Image (cartoon, rainbow, N blue to C red):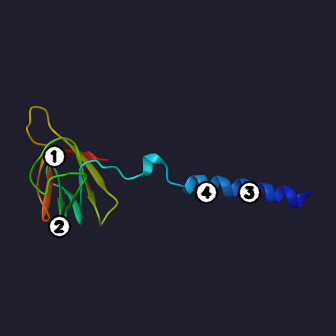
Amino acid sequence: MIKRASLAGLTLMTAALTSMLTPTASAAPTDAPGYLCSYLERDTGNQWSGIDDCTPMGGAPEIGPIQGTFTITSRSTPQTVTCTQPNNSFLSGTAETPDRVTGLQCAPA
C-alpha cells in the first residue's frame, strides 16, 4: 500500500513539474518590433539606448526613424525596455544598427 501511494505521489509531482517547465503561449517569442543589442543604457529621463551589435527583429527598421511601440533587449543583462511614441511626436526612436538604437520614451518591461 505504501509503495502505491508513493508511486502515485511521484507521478503527480512529475506531472506538476512538467507543466511548470513547459512553455506556454504567453512565453513564446512574438513578432513585435524590437532590437537585441549587446548593452542597454539609460540616457536621460525616459530615453534609453541599445548599444553595439544591435539586430532588428519583427520588422523593426535597420536605419532611420522608428514609429510605434518597440523593445530594446540587452544581451549582457536580463533587461528589456519597451519604448512608445510620445504624445504629439512623429518618432518613438531612431535606429542606427548595428551601432545604436535609441528610444525616446521607454520604461523597463
Q: Do tag 3 and tag 4 residues touch (Cβ < 8 Å)?
A: no
Residue lying furthest top in this view?
A: 88
Amino acid type shown at disc 2:
Asp
Cα–Cα gap, marks 1 and 3 = 52 Å
Cα–Cα gap, marks 3 and 4 = 11 Å
Q: Which residue is mark 4?
A: 18
Q: Residue at x 86, y 58 (%)?
A: 4
Q: Residues within 10 Å of mark 2 (few under 14, many from 20)?
A: some
- For marks 2 and 4, the one nearer the N-term is 4
Residue 52: assigned label: 2
- For marks 1 and 4, the one nearer the N-term is 4
Amino acid type shown at disc 3:
Thr
Q: Is 52 positioned to the left or the right of 17 in the image?
A: left
Q: Do tag 2 and tag 3 residues touch (Cβ < 8 Å)?
A: no
Residue 11: assigned label: 3
Q: Is 54 positioned to the left or the right of 25 in the image?
A: left
Cα–Cα gap, marks 1 and 2 = 21 Å
Camera-side residue: 99 or 76?
99
Amino acid type shown at disc 4:
Thr
Q: Do tag 2 and tag 4 residues touch (Cβ < 8 Å)?
A: no
Indicate the secondary structure of the residue bearing disc 3: helix
* Quarter residue 72 falls in: bottom left
Q: Is 42 positioned to the left or the right of 64 in the image?
A: right
In what quadrant of the picture does the N terminus appear? bottom right
Cα–Cα gap, marks 1 and 4 = 43 Å
Q: Which residue is mark 1?
A: 45
Indicate the secondary structure of the residue bearing disc 1: loop
Q: Nearer the viewer, mark 1 or mark 3?
A: 3
Amino acid type shown at disc 1:
Gly
Residue 59 versus residue 7 in the image, above or below? above
Q: Position of residue 23 (x, y in %)?
A: 50, 53
